[in-house]
Amino acid sequence: MQQHKFITLCSLPIFAVLALSLSLTLDAAGIGTALTIALCLTLFTGLAFFALFRSKAEFDAKIFLPALIAAYLLLLLRVLCFDKQTGDYVSFLKPWTQYFRDNGGFAGLGRSIGNYNIPYLTFLALFSYIPVSELYLIKLLSVGFDLLLAVSVAKLVLRCTGSPVRYMIAFAVTLLLPTVLLNGAYWGQCDSIYAGLAALSLYFILSGRPWLSMAALALSFSFKLQAIFIFPVFLVFLFTGKLKLYHLPLFPAVYFAAVSPAILAGRPVLDTLLLYVNQGSTVGNALNYNSPSVYSLFYHVADPAGASATGIICAFAFCAAMFILLFLLRGRLGDAALLLSAFIFVLAVPLFLPHMHERYFFMADVLALAVAFVFPKAAFFPALCAFASLLGYHAYLQGRFFLPMRWGFWALAIVLLLSLMLLFSDGLAPKNQKSTVQAPENLI
């Protein structure tokens, strides 16, 4: 372990120099901006490896060094994407940051601006004080959470397999996932923030730290409403005993703390706390927005309201059926089965729901990778999930469809069906063998 720490410490300055050199080639980067980018990337990377080293895994030198180099290269590749300006940045993120710049920075949080929740807007308010292009700062933030996401996925894999080799490979391959690479560094989106915190919450609950799990889950939800896709599995954690009712009040407490900057700036408390509810009318009328959901199968729907209600009912019905099955099998649910269950929920829920966007399967893309490292039979799941998501990414970023989105739906439908089969064939502990999860005597 000490040898690997020494190698990392010696290689970080080299990485910093390479990051600085690439940053200097960016369109709006002088020496100050380039130094900021290089130092932030180096700090984020150092913290990520520090988190990896906190495990008691014995690293294999033949795996560690290639994984370290791959991580460095994938982070440097992200820098090359920093100049890309998408419509979301030009129309929303840039004007929102300018709004904070014109309205006193954090003081601007006291008014309603944009349709993102307060924690992310707080970062934009912070960026308004920094003499660096907000384009680069926004992407740096997402890349930092790419690393958190990679660490969280790696720790999930280590928790479920105990394999240091898979641990390091999972870390590097998460950074390599096409949707993870494109989402933040190229597109300037922030899905790695909520997904990284959700994956971290999942790791904490599986490792017996429910308080930290609730805190991480609340932070995930405070950044993006799409964190609700993973909520159903936490009901499963309740009846398997990993989570108790007395842990739940921490969730609203942390959420309140996360949105409190707006309240302190003068925004009405109720308006701040109900932001997601008030945004319900902003989702749009279309049943599908370049996503591989079930609605990608239909070009014209005579009754959109009825079709929307049907999808919502199907999503709830699927979750209810899963709850019943998992409750009946609760004594045979180990960490691997619970991870697979979480993946099934984050895949199935947006698959049935209306008004889904192309990025709403981001968490499914990531957990598919974790599942693939735990269950070798699922090795092709990440490829199918990435294929489905990338069809939507291509439609948005290129303004045209590469293939019909229904192809993505069928890819995800296959993954969902095979995941359910895998759960009941390989995921459950044998009937005569106790799982690592014991059915609780009570919920409190």
Image: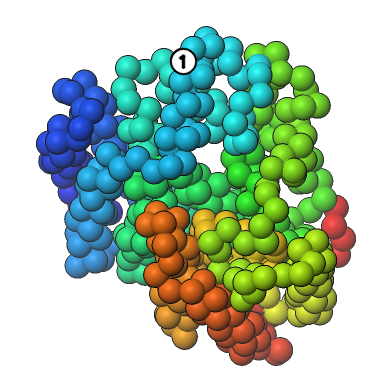
Residue at image mark 1: 101
* Residue at (54% x, 33% y) in the render: 120
Rendering quarter of residue 16? top left
Q: Nearer the viewer, residue 335 or 236?
A: 236
* Residue at (32% x, 17% y) in the render: 131
Position of the N terminus, as image quadrant, is bottom left
In the picture provided, is 357 more to the left or to the right than 26?
A: right
Q: Nearer the viewer, residue 376 or 275?
A: 275
Q: Is residue 413 above or below residue 186?
A: below
In the picture provided, is 210 more to the left or to the right than 240?
A: left
* Residue at (34% x, 46% y) in the render: 185
Counting from the top left corner in percent of width and height, residue 134 is at 37, 28
Counting from the top left corner in percent of width and height, residue 150 is at 41, 54
Does residue 437 appear in this view?
no
Counting from the top left corner in percent of width and height, residue 20 is at 16, 34
Q: Is residue 400 above or below residue 377?
A: above
Q: What colour-coding does the image apply?
A: rainbow
Which element type, helix, strand or loop, lies under badge 1? helix
Does residue 394 appear in this view?
yes
- Tag 1: residue type? Arg
Counting from the top left corner in percent of width and height, residue 391 is at 44, 67
